[in-house]
Image (cartoon, helix red, strand yellow):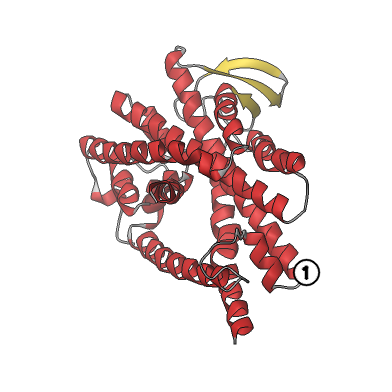
């Protein structure tokens, strides 16, 4: 039970929370707060419908059968429709994983910079091919924008998360429990930091945690026109508590979620007989890191979060469960 709660909480407070403060500055507190409320209600209803569809699966009234997302799609839909929804599921998991990887690597690169006289190091593939060390106190990474780099922070993320991606969900319970505690402590630390910086109501007019968005938006000067996020803004201030809380949050929340998304992708690929265990492991564990390198600098993180939130996640988490529920009801009737 505790492990299940930890997995849910760690993913609810995922990478998207880093964009909340800028969003509240840009649109005001009312529209995003109302949208969050709608998302909460929709998620609860969709979750119930998905559970009902799972319960209606043959010999699974007590949830004794292992039923994956792809299993339900193939059972209730035609072959072509099931294939379409399974592809959307894999794309949703891929986008979510990429956003976690990018954000964690960005925070770790600034952590490396703090230890290395303000500089982090990387291998650049575009516009030139070279190994270099650089620093930037204004961008979302220490390397500036318009570059394709394999950074030291990305390497650390890969080293820590790739082995966990080949484990099973049950094997990640301890990691999830520890991450949940650190996430809660980091979030409360942010509230104290926001208060110490001074809250200006004019920065968040009327028109993920909503408190992080509202208080974070009030604490910092408007930055939503840049490629920065809440975590990079916290990284740019000199307070040691801010640096520690950002690093603790990114490492705990995102690093704990990366193997979960990889495992879900791998489970569904294998269960759907799309590919064997080795190929499924490569696609689910290694592919997200390859794409993350391409999107690492500039607004790649924001773009992938926006795409995931407005397209893949909405379809996979809200619309498809509704269709599965209707199909299960029609089958029952």
Q: Nearer the viewer, residue 308 or 155?
A: 155
**Camera sees residue 299:** no
In this rendering, is residue 208 above or below 64? Answer: above
| Mark 1 Cα-neighbour bin, 10 Å: few <14, some 14–19, many ≥20 | few
Location of residue 210 in the rendering, given as x and y in whole percent from the top left corner: 33, 54
Residue 187 picture quarter:
top left
Residue at image location 44% in from the left, 12% down from the top: 117
Residue at image location 60% in from the left, 77% down from the top: 328
Location of residue 18 in the rendering, given as x and y in whole percent from the top left corner: 43, 43
In this rendering, is residue 2 above or below 255? Answer: below
Location of residue 198 in the rendering, given as x and y in whole percent from the top left corner: 22, 39
Q: Nearer the viewer, residue 37 or 128?
A: 37
Q: Nearer the viewer, residue 109 or 196?
A: 109
Please identify the quadrant where the C terminus is shown: bottom right
| The residue positioned farthest toward the top in the image shown | 117
In this rendering, is residue 203 above or below 39? Answer: above
| 122 lies left or right of 23 | right
Q: Element at badge 1?
A: helix
Q: What residue does disc 1 label?
A: 79
In this rendering, is residue 70 above or below 194? Answer: below
Residue at image location 57% in from the left, 71% down from the top: 53
**Camera sees residue 187:** yes
Location of residue 12 in the rendering, given as x and y in whole percent from the top left corner: 43, 51
């Amino acid at each position: 039970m505790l492990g299940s709660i930890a997995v849910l909480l760690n993913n609810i407070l995922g990478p998207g929370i880093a964009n909340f403060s800028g969003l509240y500055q840009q649109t005001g507190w009312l529209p995003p707060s109302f949208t969050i409320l709608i998302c909460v209600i929709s998620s609860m209803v969709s979750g119930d419908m998905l559970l009902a569809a799972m319960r209606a699966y043959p010999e699974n009234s007590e949830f004794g059968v292992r039923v994956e997302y792809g299993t339900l799609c193939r059972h209730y839909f035609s072959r072509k429709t099931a294939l379409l929804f399974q592809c959307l599921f894999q794309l949703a998991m891929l986008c979510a994983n990429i956003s976690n990887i990018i954000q964690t690597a960005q925070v770790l690169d600034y952590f490396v910079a703090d230890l290395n006289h303000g500089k982090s190091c990387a291998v650049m593939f575009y516009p030139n091919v070279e190994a270099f060390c650089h620093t930037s106190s204004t961008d979302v990474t220490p390397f500036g924008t318009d570059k394709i780099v394999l950074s030291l922070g990305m390497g650390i993320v890969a080293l820590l998360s790739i082995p966990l991606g080949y484990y099973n969900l049950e094997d990640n319970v301890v990691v999830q429990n520890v991450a949940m505690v650190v996430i809660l402590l980091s979030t409360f630390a942010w509230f104290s930091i926001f208060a110490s910086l001074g809250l200006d109501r004019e920065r968040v007019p009327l028109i993920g945690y909503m408190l992080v968005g509202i208080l974070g938006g009030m604490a910092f000067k408007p930055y939503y026109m840049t490629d920065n996020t809440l975590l990079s803004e916290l990284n740019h201030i000199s307070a040691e508590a801010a640096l520690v809380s950002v690093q603790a949050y990114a490492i705990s929340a995102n690093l704990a979620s990366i193997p979960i998304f990889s495992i879900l992708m791998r489970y569904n690929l294998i269960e759907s007989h799309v590919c064997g265990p080795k190929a499924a492991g490569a696609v689910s564990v290694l592919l997200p890191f390859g794409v993350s390198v391409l999107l690492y600098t500039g607004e790649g993180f924001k773009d992938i979060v926006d795409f995931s939130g407005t397209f893949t996640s909405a379809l996979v988490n809200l619309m498809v469960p509704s269709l599965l529920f209707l199909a299960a009801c029609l089958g029952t009737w």
